[in-house]
Image (cartoon, rainbow, N blue to C red):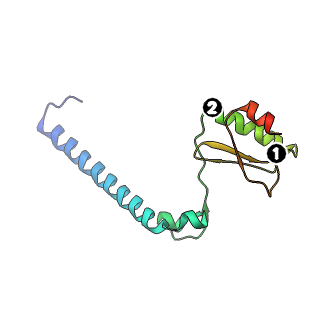
Amino acid sequence: MKLNTDENVVTLAARFTVNEGAILTLNEQVDGISQEIGGLEKRNELILSHLGIDSTRRVFVSENLTFAARQIKRAALRLKEAGKLSSVFTKLGIIFVKRRKDQQAVAISTESQLSSFL
């Protein structure tokens, strides 16, 4: 950005001040959420009140999966629809499947691994 006049400097400084305030506010919210969540790992649920919204409704976060992980998940969901799997879910970008509900989830990293799991 080219600055020619003092007015541009003032405008730019004001914009940085506003952005800094927004960033500070966001950081405060994140810190508050981190403190409030505390036992979230035990309950394994995130609700709107954790985000500062007056509600007890649950929040579900959709993961941003890689192309390969999306392909694996898509194939696993097809198998679930066909009744060959009981559960398909992701955690930290990894696809997990269960053949039966009473079994422990297995991490799947390739489509061939998914095929051999059956």
At a point 61% along the width and 64% down the height, the residue shown is 58
At a point 82% along the width and 46% down the height, the residue shown is 85
At a point 60% along the width and 34% down the height, the residue shown is 66
At a point 78% along the width and 54% down the height, the residue shown is 103
Q: Determine crowd level at label 2: few under 14, some 14-19, many 20+ residues with C-alpha closer than 10 A.
A: few
Give percent across and percent down for residue 22: 33, 53
Identify the disc placed on residue 67: 2
Q: Quadrant of the C terminus?
A: top right
Q: What residue type is labelled 1?
A: Lys
Q: Which of 29 and 95 is in front in this view?
A: 95
Q: Distance between the residues labelled 2 and 1?
A: 20 Å
| Residue 72 horizontal side relative to residue 26, left or right | right
| Residue 39 horizontal side relative to residue 99, left or right | left
Earlier residue among tags 2 and 1: 2
Q: Determine crowd level at label 1: few under 14, some 14-19, many 20+ residues with C-alpha closer than 10 A.
A: some
Q: Can residue 105 be seen in this view?
A: yes
Q: Nearer the viewer, residue 28 or 89?
A: 89
| Residue 106 horizontal side relative to residue 61, left or right | right
Q: Is mark 1 on a helix, strand or loop?
A: helix
Q: Can residue 47 be seen in this view?
A: no
Q: Is mark 2 on a helix, strand or loop?
A: helix
Quadrant of the rendered structure where residue 59 is? bottom right
Identify the disc placed on residue 80: 1
Give percent across and percent down for residue 29: 40, 61
Give percent across and percent down for residue 7: 15, 40
Quadrant of the rendered structure where residue 32 is? bottom left
Q: Residue extending furthest left?
A: 6
Please determine whether, in this image, residue 26 is positioned above or below residue 38.
above
Q: What residue type is labelled 2?
A: Phe
Label count reads 2
